[in-house]
Amino acid sequence: MTSNTISPFIRRFSSHKPEDLVQNPVKFNIKLNPWWATGFIDGEGSFILNIYQDQQQKTGWRIQLAFSIALHLKDRDLLERMVNTLGVGKIYKHGSYSVQLRVQSIVELAQIIGHIEKYPQLVITAKLSDYKLFKQAYDLICLNEHLNEEGLRKLVGIKSSINLGLSPELKEAFPLNTSVNRPSVLKREQQVSDPNWLAGFISAEGCFFIAS
């Protein structure tokens, strides 16, 4: 581990008021361990494909990809570290008591994909299904296929299998569209290749409690 890399990172429980955390966010130059970051992404990250009407587009529909992590305000400093680690993303207010790291541009999403491909421990959880579908959509957009009807139909097919699937509006607009099969990725024999991934995943999804 280098001197500018931190792992594992413990999520904070702060007595600061949420509004104080928004106005005075703590800035960090320390990077998270990259495997820890992937573990945390596996637990808290979201790979999003949005399709909505926009008459300014040639097809009448706008395609938007996004990667995000939403946390309570008390964990904003962790998102600051994540931005520094991934090298992209901005943090926005997300509701009354939460903040969100968000990446939307194709150029910046390339950095997120590059990180996942280099540290691919997502293979042991179902989150990889969303990532693979997201990557399919990303590749189509990079080829400008989202600008024609055929490419749009492909993206609608991907949308039907990712996140919450198609909205009623999309189902009505594309009644004959064929869904893309959701990749099956769980492998019982798969081993965690780096303990830092496990630390990141536990920090995202783990729960420590005392039962009486």
Image (tube, grey):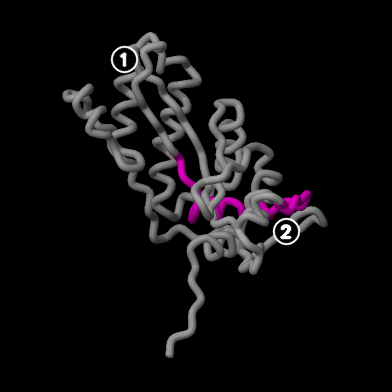
The location of residue 58, given as percent across then percent down, is 38, 9
> Which residue is rendered at x = 61% and y = 52% of the image?
37
**Which dot marks residue 195?**
none
The residue that label 2 is drawn on is 6
Q: Are marks 1 and 2 in contact (CB under 8 Å)?
A: no
- Relative to 118, say whether 208 is above or below: below
The location of residue 144, given as percent across then percent down, is 46, 15
Taking the view exactly as shown, the residue that stands out farthest to the left is 176
Q: Nearer the viewer, residue 178 or 73?
A: 73
Q: Does 46 appear in magenta? A: yes
Q: Nearer the viewer, residue 116 or 92?
A: 92
- Relative to 85, say whether 161 is above or below: above
Q: Nearer the viewer, residue 160 or 136?
A: 160
Gap in Å between the C-alphas at discs 1 and 2? 46 Å
The residue that label 1 is drawn on is 150
The location of residue 38, given as percent across then percent down, is 57, 51
Taking the view exactly as shown, the residue that stands out farthest to the right is 3
Taking the view exactly as shown, the residue that stands out farthest to the bottom is 212
Q: Residues within 10 Å of mark 1 (few under 14, many from 20)?
A: few
Type of amino acid at the residue the image marks with label 1: Glu
> Which residue is rendered at x = 69% and y = 50% of the image?
23
User: Can residue 121 be seen from the camera position used here?
Assistant: no
Q: Earlier in the sequence, mark 1 or mark 2?
A: 2
Tag 1, which secondary structure? helix
Type of amino acid at the residue the image marks with label 2: Ile
Q: Magenta segment, which residues?
A: 24-47
The location of residue 8, given as percent across then percent down, is 66, 63
Taking the view exactly as shown, the residue that stands out farthest to the top is 58
